[in-house]
Amino acid sequence: MRLQLLGVLGLLGGCAGVYAEVAASTVSTGSIAPSGGGTSVDVGGSTVGFNLGVELGNVRKRFSMGYASDSLSFDGGSGTLTGGASRFDFNIVSLMERLKLRIALGFDFAGGSSSYAGMKKSDGGGFTGFGGLDATYFLTWKNAIHVAAGAQFIAQSVPGGDYSGVGVSVRATISHTFGDVRPDQTVVIPLETNRDLIGAIELGSKAVGCATEGQTHGDTAATLTVSCPGQHHLEYFQIAEGILLTCVHEDSEDSCRAINSKIIQAAAAEVKAAAQPEPAPTPVVPVEVPAAEATPAP
């Protein structure tokens, strides 16, 4: 049970960071509904805005909250919306190691002012919602650019009624996180015996060209840190139930398991070689040298 709990805790995580976003939208199907009832008036429109805030994410997903300001223009009027913004993006496919295609979702609840037909309203609050596709490219594992396109719904209170519409929105974002966005991969390895295997893993690690440090052996746990070529960093934590392996900033669980499998195979070979007895020395067989024949006197 302790091993499963450690595994669940290892799956949690994300890097804190900051971001800045600009957006532009066109409202192709907009209308103003009179507050007292009656026929809606069809009006087109457009919005431009920006968004600043903080985020929490990794190479698989991104969640952000911040301050948004949008300016709305439509036939016969305009409006401004300022307030809180939330975004949530998550991967659907990795196009390349650094390029991810994501689903992008967002919404803003805001207050503001508006004008229409020569009248003004100072409490013209509203709402915007966005959904579409996002392409995220990691310039480094701390800095990324995000370009999203999709559908946007916008609604705002205006003098004498309410404006609402649906259109297409394009958003460009730059983000910076304070740590490596690649998540740690956690693998739980159950064991049928409580034998301490850390020493054998260290032998296997060195056999495949990895460096080791931090080997400890206690009454209830043993640990080992392994650094392999290619910036692979593995941390082993063994207790009676099994081994918790953490691959730090590894792209996938499969790559983490592949590196560990290579180390374990080398460890098994090293242990097997150490257990084999040394071969007996080859006996030395004396070689008889024939005696030289005496040369007769002249």
Image: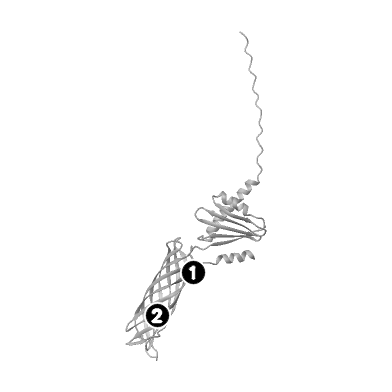
Q: Which residue is mark 1?
A: 56
User: Residue 20 at x, y = what percent?
Assistant: 41, 70
Q: Is residue 279 left or right of residue 82?
A: right
Q: Nearer the viewer, residue 137 or 179?
A: 179
Q: Which residue is mark 2?
A: 81
> Residue at position x 61%, y 66% from top?
5
Label 2 – label 1 distance at C-alpha: 25 Å
170 is higher (above) or lower (below) than 279:
below
Where is residue 19 drawn, in percent x and y? 43, 69
Cβ atoms under marks 2 and 1 closer than 8 Å:
no
Residue positioned 44% across, 66% down in the render: 176
The colouring scheme, among rainbow, by chain, secondary structure or one colour, is one colour
Is residue 110 placed above or below 206 in the rendered structure? below
Q: Quadrant of residue 107?
A: bottom left
Picture quadrant of residue 244: bottom right
Residue 279 in the image, given as x and y percentages of width and height: 65, 40
Under mark 1, the amino acid is Leu
What quarter of the picture does the N terminus occupy? Answer: bottom right
Q: Amino acid at mark 2?
A: Leu
The quarter of the image holding the C terminus is top right
Q: Nearer the viewer, residue 126 or 94?
A: 126
Query: Residue 14, position in %: x, y?
Result: 51, 67
- Which residue is depicted at the point 49% across and 69% down? 56
SS label for mark 2: strand
Q: Earlier in the sequence, mark 2 or mark 1?
A: 1
Q: Secondary structure at mark 1?
A: strand
